[in-house]
């Protein structure tokens, strides 16, 4: 295996869209009513802010990509990269999989939760694939 990329599950993406609709519909409705009172602009700005913040807060763009050189991950918006020589391994954390660094630090990989599509087995298989790439690079 040369490289692999893991993104958020389709269920997480769908959930984000549902949250956006739940937020946007009532706010848009209230904005249309409040427009007559002069508050429509403020509510429209708040609706746009909520639509932008929801995917970020729910890690819609979280990903992990790995190849023979190292691992890259994106939690929220920032992409980080480490060579395999700086990675000690992976462990289960409170919210999912944690990347353990050789310097003793840990990074939560938000896309690798303790369940993937509701399955712990699928989540464990993803971590196993990353471990194989890490060992193959050593």
Image (cartoon, helix red, strand yellow):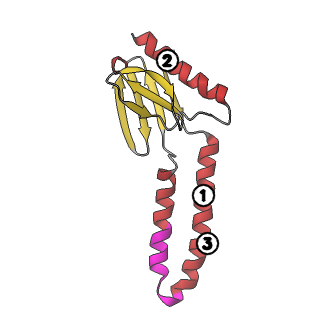
Label 1: which residue?
A: 19
* Residue that sits furthest to the bottom in the current view: 37
Percent from the top left, x then y, of residue 107?
41, 33
Vertical placement of residue 97 versus 29, above or below: above
The part of the image, by quadrant, that contains residue 114 is top right
Q: Please report the bounds of the magenta region as a residue range.
A: 36-47
The numbered dot on residue 104 is none
Q: Secondary structure at mark 2?
A: helix
Please provide percent x and percent y for residue 127: 54, 23
- Mark found first going from the N terminus, 2 or 1: 1
Which residue position holds label 2? 131
Question: For the C terminus, which image quadrant?
Answer: top left
- Residue drawn at x 48%, y 40% as measured from the top left: 62
Percent across and percent down for residue 58 are 52, 49
Q: Alpha carbon of mark 2 to alpha carbon of mark 1: how far?
A: 34 Å
In whole angstroms, how far apart are the C-alphas of marks 3 and 2?
46 Å
**Given the current orientation, which residue lies at the most extreme right position?**
118
Q: Secondary structure at mark 1?
A: helix
Q: Residues within 10 Å of mark 2 (few under 14, many from 20)?
A: some
């Amino acid at each position: 295996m040369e490289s692999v990329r893991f993104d958020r599950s389709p269920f997480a993406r769908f959930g984000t869209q549902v949250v956006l609709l739940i937020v946007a519909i009532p706010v848009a409705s209230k904005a249309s009513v409040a427009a007559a009172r002069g508050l429509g602009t403020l509510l429209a700005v708040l609706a746009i802010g909520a639509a932008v913040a929801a995917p970020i807060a729910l890690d819609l763009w979280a990903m992990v990509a790995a190849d023979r050189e190292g691992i890259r991950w994106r939690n929220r918006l920032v992409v980080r990269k480490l060579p395999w020589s700086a990675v000690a391994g992976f462990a289960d954390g409170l919210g999912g999989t944690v990347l353990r660094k050789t310097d003793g630090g840990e990074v939560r990989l938000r896309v690798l939760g303790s369940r993937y599509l509701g399955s712990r087995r699928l989540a464990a298989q993803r971590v196993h694939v990353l471990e194989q790439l890490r060992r193959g690079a050593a």
